[in-house]
Image (spheres, grey):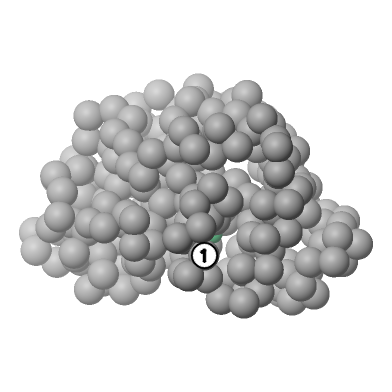
């Protein structure tokens, strides 16, 4: 089975289309979504529609939840909150709100492979897995062989060998069945690793490889729309620097 694994689209339709084009040319069987289809960018409705029609498995991100649940707003900084409020207005009365409501926090997509947006130990708190220490908590909190996550907007992950957690920053990750993995495909619509290209991954469970890809897209067009929408200017500038 070849899974297209995507996370953190963030209403960036130009990046999403570029990822789908590239993934189609590579070929995949099922699309797995790790949360945050909306927030920050100018095309929430278009991105939800495009995702909905293609998604096989998906989980909610903090931005997806914040559109439908007021109690989530306290987790956000001022700029993100402004974008959430803009997105809420944009999606007011949208039939697609039910799609956001339907997304669970975690899901097992096949035996041993679990998906979540932030963490599996406490998915509703939206913690970031950035260090081996944080990864260790995840490895010890559930029995998964592979956990796929998003939220950090940084591709890569961690492997668990014996009791040791090793960070991985390779783009080609060969999965050893005697080890366990926490893997992140990076962000489609707002990369934060200093590379402004959209990021995604293909998980091939037959070949046992998690392959990360980067693809150029027209961030200038999304920047133009963000400015035109009156969204915070920083949300446009960061797309160019990939931070
Ligand atoms: Fe995100």
Left-right relation of 223 to 117? right
Which x, y percent locates residue 109?
33, 30
Give the camera-side residue of 100 and 136: 100
Which x, y percent locates residue 35?
49, 47
Whether 241 is drawn above or below 198: the answer is below
Is any atom of residue 26 visible in this view? Answer: no
Residue furthest left as drawn: 162
Whether 100 is drawn above or below 167: the answer is above
How many numbered marks, from 0 up? 1
Is any atom of residue 142 visible in this view? Answer: yes
Q: Quadrant of residue 208?
A: top left
Quarter placement of the C terminus: bottom right
Seen at 22% across and 56% down, the residue is: 121
Quarter placement of the N terminus: top left
Seen at 54% across and 39% down, the residue is: 100
Whether 144 is drawn above or below 235: the answer is above
Which x, y percent locates residue 217?
77, 52
Specify the quarter for ligand 1. bottom right
Seen at 46% across and 60% down, the residue is: 72
Whether 200 is drawn above or below 110: the answer is below
Q: Secondary structure at mark 1?
A: helix
Left-right relation of 216 to 135? right
Left-right relation of 142 to 227? left
Give the camera-side residue of 164 and 138: 138
Left-right relation of 160 to 155? left
Give the camera-side residue of 187 and 178: 187
Residue ID for mark 1: 73
Seen at 29% across and 40% down, the residue is: 114
């Amino acid at each position: 089975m070849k899974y297209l694994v995507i996370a953190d689209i963030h209403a960036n339709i130009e990046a999403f289309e570029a990822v789908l084009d590239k993934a189609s040319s590579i070929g995949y069987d099922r699309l797995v979504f790790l949360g945050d289809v909306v927030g920050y960018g100018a095309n929430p409705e278009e991105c939800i529609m495009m995702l909905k029609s293609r998604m096989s498995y998906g989980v909610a991100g903090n931005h997806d939840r914040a559109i439908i649940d007021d109690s989530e707003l306290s987790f956000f900084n001022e700029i993100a909150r402004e974008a959430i409020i803009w997105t809420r207005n944009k999606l007011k009365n949208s039939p697609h709100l039910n799609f956001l409501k339907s997304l669970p926090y975690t899901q097992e997509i096949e035996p041993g492979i679990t998906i979540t947006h932030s963490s599996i130990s406490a998915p509703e708190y939206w913690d970031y897995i950035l260090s081996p220490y944080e990864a260790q908590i995840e490895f010890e909190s559930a029995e998964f062989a592979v956990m796929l996550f998003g939220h950090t907007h940084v591709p890569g992950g961690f492997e668990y060998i014996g009791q040791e957690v090793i960070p991985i920053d390779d783009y080609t990750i060969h999965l050893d069945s005697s080890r366990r993995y926490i893997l992140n495909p990076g962000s489609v619509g707002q990369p934060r690793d200093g590379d402004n290209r959209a990021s995604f991954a293909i998980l091939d469970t037959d070949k046992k490889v998690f392959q990360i890809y980067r693809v150029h897209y027209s961030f200038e067009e999304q920047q133009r729309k963000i400015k035109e929408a009156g969204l915070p200017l920083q949300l446009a500038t960061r797309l160019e620097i990939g931070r």
